[in-house]
Image (cartoon, coloured by chain):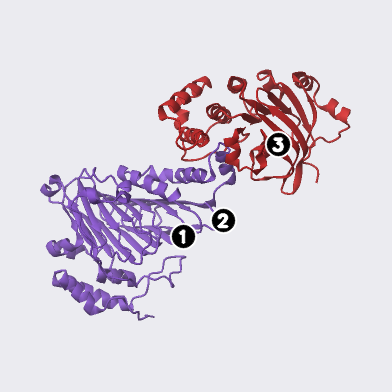
Amino acid sequence: MSTLVIKDLHVSIEDKEILKGVNLTINTNEVHAIMGPNGTGKSTLASAIMGHPKYEVTQGTIELDGENVLEMEVDERAQAGLFLAMQYPSEISGVTNADFVRSAINARRGEGNEISLMKFIRELDKTMDFLDMDQDMAQRYLNEGFSGGEKKRNEILQLMMIKPTFAILDEIDSGLDIDALKVVAKGINEMRGEGFGCLAITHYQRLLNYITPDHVHVMMQGRVVKSGGPELAHRLEAEGYDWIKKELGIEDETVEQEA
Amino acid sequence: MTVETKLALSVDEVRSFSQLNNEPLWFTDFRVSAIEKATELPMPTPDKTNITNWNFLEFPNHTVESATFSSLDELSDEVREVIDIEGQENLYIQRNNTPAFLKVSEELKTQGVIFTDIQTAIREHSDLVKQYFMTTAVKVDEHKLAAYHAALVNGGVFVYVPKNVVLEKPLQVVFINDNEDASLFNHVLLVADKNSSVTYVETYVSTVSESKGQANIIEEVIALDNAQVNFGAVDVLAKGFTTYVNRRGHILRDAKVDWALGLMNDSDTISESITHLVGDGSNANTKTVVVGRGEQKQNFTTEIRHWGKNSEGFILKHGVMRESAQSIFNGIGKIEHGASKSNAVQESRVLMLSENARGDANPILLIDEDDVMAGHAASAGRVDPIQLFYLMSRGISKADAERLIIHGFLAPVVQSIPIKSVQEQLTKVIEGKVR
């Protein structure tokens, strides 16, 4: 079993503090959902775990099986087993999807242990079929000209090919129609198991109809303010966030509007 | 104002070099007159690059002796890595200043094609050489470096394709530089006679890590009526050279030239590619890729000048600057008065990979005629840190992520190059430069 432990995490962007002490522990074989209204720091948490260059960690720790993640470069975090499915995946001109995924797999496997081309092609074909992706997407340039839905599917394709220990999904459901959402959920559910943990960030309960979380956390004001089981998500769907704000005496749940 | 300059060779030395090579008298006189001009002519003035302190004139030796190759097996791995040597039916190899290997297919011989080193051509095809050598495309008295080149020519190639001859297989030329004292005053003269068609590919490969010499290279392409020339060049000269490379096209009626240039030198380089679309209906397509690294300073000027009516010129140029490399990319489309219905299009893109790298794209359109079409696009920018983050978040190292971005940035040009062997060579050279 692997464990990702986040303790008292404070994160700033351009000297403005967004995360103000996040605590979270995720084990493999668990799916955690982070919910919360817009502007409460959910995406900042996802980006900070992966080492986004714009975010500065000012306090706290992130450890993966006792290893200090914050000391690792972005690629080292990935090689240690972390994966971030991004809200807005970059477009890279001139680099085909297939070449990119193979480079990523080989980077994790290390020199001398590269995946054979045949095996790679078989796995890529199979996974693209599973995700209802057109085979010609393999030879298209990475995310270039992809629709919003195609980009999200492509993130899940990478997830399934790279097989990380922990996946962080940053609003993987935003901008998806129901069919695409089902496909994305199918991919994530396929990954669930002993060697895989997941942190899904969303502000819609809808995603959780297809991916049943083991734990649900609510973020407000740059902190996790409430945690529970799947029933918490259902209550949020039915009643919204106001009852939590009332319970905790929070007036403005966002961090972004504070100067 | 003229400035007297001390040149590395005297008039007498130039004369005796010519005589030693059994050159015809007209060429000896041509050299002598050129060295006299070189003393007084001003230096060229590449736009936006100050070359006042560059050393273009001094070198250790004018010529060096190198062994020839009796078999292709003697070629080094560094050369083989870049070029598919065995796959060539027509191959000329020059080693430093020595003609070192020549293979010409029967097809070429029976069709009357001339494909030989420049020294042999000066002796054996004197009439043709005399007609075109720095008379039509590049002129001796343009500036000091042109005259200096004319006086000191010590290598190069002559290609003549007779009327109506259509060559299917490319001519491959390899200029190997494996002596650090060597200077390359190479002259390439390619004349495609009426209705002919030829693909010419040249590759400059340095296997020395640092050169002490000069590279003063002038190449002239003359396409007569309705001829078609595919010209590919991959330059990979070592650090230490001061490189001046001038590729000039003179394109007559309905003729067409396609330039595919991979400018991958590690030296300070002034590269000038000018095509004159002289004839009505003539066409030039220039594709250039560049990777700069280290402390290099380079200037790439690509110009297409329209004189003929209905002439079309396309410039596509992508460059990547790494480390502390600095480059100017000048793209010039000039439509002269009378060149009506002409079309001048250019696109220049520069990607900088580090804080210290510098690349400026200067698109220039000069139009002296009303009834024309013209367009340009240019951009110069740094690599997007979010793109790097995305690639690295999949476990790809920063170096590999940059490598992918560079290949991707150059791919639209590389993949549009019509000569497959040039595409392959370039892909390998780019890989070598970004590793």
Chain containing mark 1: B
Residue corresponding to mark 2? B355
Q: Residues within 10 Å of mark 1 (few under 14, many from 20)?
A: many
Are dots 1 and 2 on a single chain?
A: yes
Does the CB distance between marks 1 and 2 fall below 8 Å?
Answer: no
Q: CA distance from mark 1 to mark 2?
A: 16 Å
Residue at point 45% right, 33% down?
A114
Q: Earlier in the sequence, mark 1 or mark 2?
A: 1
Report x, y in % for residue B352. Answer: 52, 53
Location of the N terminus of chain B (image quadrant): bottom left
Question: Position of B127 compared to B342: left or right?
Answer: left
Residue at point 47% right, 24% down?
A123
Q: Residues within 10 Å of mark 3 (few under 14, many from 20)?
A: many
Q: Which mark is residue A45?
A: 3
Give the drawing colour for chain A: red
Residue corresponding to mark 1? B328
Chain containing mark 3: A
Are dots 2 and 3 on a single chain?
A: no
Report x, y in % for residue A163. Answer: 56, 28
Q: Is residue A202 visible?
A: no
Residue type at mark 1: give it: Ile
Tell me, by letter, which chain the rendering colours purple: B
Residue type at mark 2: give it: Glu
